Amino acid sequence: MRAQRSLTRRLLGTVLLLELISAAMLIAAGAVYEWRAHLTAFDVMLRGRADTLLGAVSDAEDPGDNVMLDMTGLSIPSRDIYRVEDEKGRILGASSIAIPEDVLARARASNKPAKARVRNHAYRLVRITGVRIVDPGDANGGVRHEITVFYGSRTGHIRHAVFEAVRFYATATLLLLLITSVAIIWLLRRDLAPLRHLAREAENISAQNWLFSAPAAAWETAELAPLARAIEAALARLQRSFDQQRRFTSDAAHELKTDVAIAKSSLQLLGMRSRSVEEYRRGLELCLDDCTRLERTVQQMLTLARVEHGEVSSAMEAATCSMRECLAMSVRHTATFAELRRVKVEVHAVGDSQVSMDQRDGALLCSNLILNAIEHSPAGAVVTALLKQEEDRVVLSIADEGEGIAATDLPHICEPFYRGDPSRNRKSGGTGLGLAICKAICERAGGAMEVRNRTVRGAEAIVILPLLSVPNPIPASGSLNDVL
Amino acid sequence: MRVLIVEDELRLAENLSAALREAGLAVDHAADGLAGEEFARQDIYDAIILDLMLPGKSGLALLRALRQRRKRTPVLILTAQEGKASVVELLNAGADDYLSKPFDLGELLARVKALIRRGKGVADPVLRVGDVEVNSLQQTALRGGQTLDLSPTEYRILEYLMHRPRAVVSKRELLEHLYDYDWEHHSNVIEVHVSNLRRKLNAGGAEPLIETLRSRGYRMRMERELA
């Protein structure tokens, strides 16, 4: 749980981070704007006060036609600094706090307001110039005086005002973040509820209980509907294969128990009392028959297990065989049985028939199908085996002229242990696994098998296998005896 | 005693029949559910051994149909199915006993015999009527402590009559329960067997025990009547 990533947390974190970044940028921009606005207003105020001072410069009424600063009626804030001088550098008036020379020099050099530190306080200083004419009515037009006013004021309160504004923005942002996170958490919780319901529903699934129906809320959520659909589909597939497996296990157990019961009862019957040698001999023969039957059931089950789930080794993958050869061998091997049942087996083979299949499996497939066909044929009938190439496929059809398969059995005929008529198949010696083995062999080779009724009479097994494009020569070994 | 085996496994049925016959029972065999039902309906069996997985009609369906018709023949089920649930279902459907495959033949015989006894209202394998004692396990008969030397058929007649003391048992009933389906061939022989049995029972000059009721059958007399 510790290392888990939480979508909610990530989403919340991302949203809050983005919000925080934009808020920070907003605050910065706001602070800059506030600062500039305050400065502009401050400069206007400074110039205004400087102008007031300029206005206060008047004729000194002295013989030298000088000017003087008349402070009457002026109230200059005591913290402000100023200095008024005429063109000759004569100081007409100055604040009690003197403006340092270097600041004055800087102010003289530039038209822009100058920053300064006076007595440990930050000041902003403007310089304005104006002209005062003494006695303008004189013949020579009076005496011109160029007046320069330096005026400065403390800037501390601007910083304070900007800081206050920033603090307001920051507080508002924090509040906004808080509201956003609560809203996001609430929304996520509400919107993720279908996911939790889905999970709770899925939790109830077990091998015993396959029931799963996605909650309606999940179906109504566009993002969850595919998940619900996928879970339902996966479960349906799993249940099908699980049921199949369970049925197979139960059928296999039934089959084995029956065979064991027969063998055991035969032996116990023999031992119930002392018998003649002839009786023992006959009894032992029967016991051996029963054991052979048990052995065949086990053998078939193992074959099915090997074909269905066996490991695919590289040697097996590379194995190829010619269906034509397999068919021919199977027909040879079943010839005696066909003769016994007085059934004729006809083979027609055309085209290429190389398939990717172990030769043992190929022979097993053919002989199983042919034996099946012979078994269900009446005496004198013909079993037709047709092998042909259809483009990139090999098609094998084995047809009999028997009574066909009941429609109700047709869909299940290839299922392990399925028997349309249990007693009949048991008597004829089938284990009920033959067709299942054939189907598994075909599917392992990437093909398919289908059993259907012929239009006229009898049943037909159709095997479709992918044709190998490059036919590999098969070593002509006839070692198929061990297969059958 | 006559037993019906309903079992589609031919070899198993053969073995069961042989074992039951060797135990002194008459046996009929039905290979599928439908034939089994037809046989069972005749109500001539003292016990039925029923397989569950049958073609035609399942053992369970057969059992239900039988009980619905109020046939009370004891039924022993043979099953290869797992699970307690099916056992409960079987017993609820009216089965008297069950054995799962593979079973022990000796156990099966013992259970069938016990079912037959209980079906006749007797729990003890040793039957006593008057001074006659029949041990159905050892298949021996005593009268007044003396062992009687009976042929298998004579023993079976005695055992059947001992199961139903004082009741009139018709010749047909006796035949049905002692022989397999071809009992009609034995119809004349049975009289000979009964008379032999009666002779052996009366060997010591004791009271005659089996009385013949003309055109009705035979009857085993009780002690009270003997006295």
Image (tube, rainbow, N blue to C red):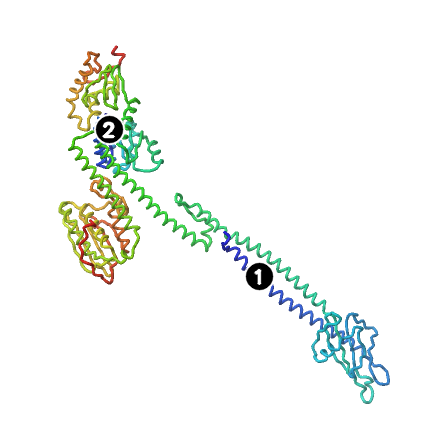
The type of residue carrying mark 1 is Glu
Q: Residue furthest top?
A: B227
Instruction: Compute the Cα span from label 1 to label 2.
Output: 91 Å
Q: Nearer the viewer, residue A472 or A12?
A: A472
Up-down: is A215 above or below A349?
Answer: above
Classify mark 1: residues with Cα within 10 Å, few (<14), some (14-19) or many (20+): some
Residue A184 seen from this side:
yes
Q: Quadrant of residue B185?
A: top left
Residue A183 horizontal/vertical position (percent): 57, 55
Q: Nearer the viewer, residue B112 or A318?
A: A318
The answer for which chain carries disc 1 is A
Residue A159 horizontal/vertical position (percent): 69, 67
Residue B218 horizontal/vertical position (percent): 21, 18
The residue that mark 2 highlights is: B3
The residue that mark 1 highlights is: A19
Classify mark 2: residues with Cα within 10 Å, few (<14), some (14-19) or many (20+): many
Q: What residue appears at the point 29 percent right and 50 percent down from the top-left corner? A: A308
The type of residue carrying mark 2 is Val
